[in-house]
Image (cartoon, helix red, strand yellow):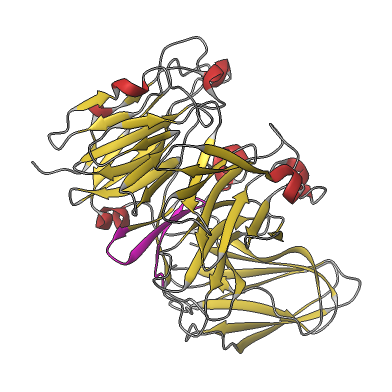
Amino acid sequence: MNVSGVFPRLAQVGDFGPPRSELGVGSLMPWNGKLYVQNYNSHKASSGAGVSLRRIEADFSMEIVAETLGVDGTYTNRFVHYPTSKLVLGPHVIDQDHKIVTIPELQPLRVCGTSRHLTKPDTHVYVLAMEGELFELDVTTYECTQLFDLNDELGTDGEMKVHYKDCYTSFGRLVVCSNEYSEPEWAGDRARGRLAEYDGQQWKVLRTDPYTAIGGRHEFGGTIFATGWDRASAILEVFTEADQKWTRYRLPKASHCFDHKWQTEWPRIREVEHERLLMDHHGMFYELSPWAYGGRIWGVRPISTHLWVLGDFCSWRGMLVAGADNASPSGGLNPTTAEPQSGLWFGKTDDLWSFGAPAGWGGPWWETPVVAGEPSDPYLMTGFRGKCLHLENFSEHALTITVEIDFHGHGRFGAVETLTVEPGQIRTHVFPDGFSAHWVRVVSDTDGVASAQFVYT
């Protein structure tokens, strides 16, 4: 049997209801010969039923896991605890013989992340829920204890006003993120998003933009990656062990359909080929190396664009499996959809290159106060065909803006163009066909307010 595409008989379909919200594929996990599919509804058990854990066998038969019948909720976490050979998936702990224990403290919550424990990694994990509840779970005794309410620790606002998404532990830090973003964030009137870390003693807020995914390969490669965005562009935040600091890179947005917090869910960073990461970010797939040389990354290359709402993807039996969130009645807000359902796509990683060609827009500045001689964040420039830059000057005096590129990829930039933009004016620069570099940035000669937006086709 050759496989490439959607298997309709493996569709994930929720109860007809009411209520009828959505059924998305929250997480996919191969586990001792089987593929587990954890579904989710929009907001805890009261928003819809029929999203129980499913299990797919090697012959592509699928069953609803009997022990999880009636466990309806919003679950998107997955984590293999190697010291005990147990899988934490949603509110469940699954042993190597596929015996399942459901943790009662986690069942009613929107569980979104699980990660290593800083001080008890052999027996415990951290579990994060979307309203900011952070637990430690003993996977040997199943004791589950809440450690923090992150709304108190990080200054976020509680249920329906916060949207925690992921957690990840490496290099002596537990990193968490939330992606709260709507009109007030876009307008610059509010900043509810968070990227934050905990060193075992205290919490530190790193950024107040929306972030959706955190990942890496732990000690291998010396990096942690976090994906987010603001109104100017998509963002890739990178922690490097060598530098012990975070560096911000910027990427194009393939679609503005992913800007709102609810429409972002759930882009992932995950290894699907050995020692290679696949990153899904703001409507675009990227290949990503876990290594950082000299504290810098440059192995970021766009693969393709898409409109999928992907909850997760993984490798299973030599295939790339992707789980979507396809059709949601949303309690009647979508009058052309009657039942919540989503599909599973099976193919090969290389199939992704046959999707939409890489294209997008964004840049380091959007009506941004700029400081003379201070370079912008690096912005991705490789892997696209046509490229142009639009500059707009909101200042009362002319700005001379230098375009600098890093074609080695290791953080050394050199000037390639100098453009003067008069007050209140827009200036466009079209790069020659075939022009490319790993990263590009812009620098103003004078303090002012400006936009710098690249359009890639």
Q: Residue at x 54, y 60 (%)?
A: 226
Does the magenta segment cover residue 283?
yes
The quadrant where residue 402 appears = bottom right
Q: Is residue 308 visible?
A: no
Does the magenta segment cover residue 119?
no
Q: Residue at x 59, y 87 (%)?
A: 413
Q: Is residue 193 left or right of residue 370?
A: left
Which residue is at the front of the view, 58 or 322? 58
Which residue is at the front of the view, 111 or 341? 111
Q: Residue at x 55, y 57 (%)?
A: 227
Say above or below: 181 vs 360.
above
Magenta span: chief secondary structure = strand
Which residue is at the front of the view, 262 or 26? 26
Q: Quadrant of the N terminus?
A: top left
Residue pushed farthest right?
A: 396
Residue 201: image location, x then y, percent: 68, 60
The number of numbered discs placed on residues in the rendered structure image is: 0
Say above or below: 202 vs 248.
above
Q: Which residues are magenta?
A: 272-290
Residue 172: image location, x then y, percent: 55, 66
Q: Is residue 1 visible?
A: yes
Q: Is residue 344 left or right of residue 206?
A: left
Q: Residue at x 45, y 51 (%)?
A: 268
The quadrant where residue 339 appears = top left
Residue 306: image location, x then y, percent: 42, 48
Residue pushed farthest top?
A: 18
Residue 263: image location, x then y, percent: 56, 39
Say above or below: 54 vs 127.
above
The quadrant where residue 23 appears = top left
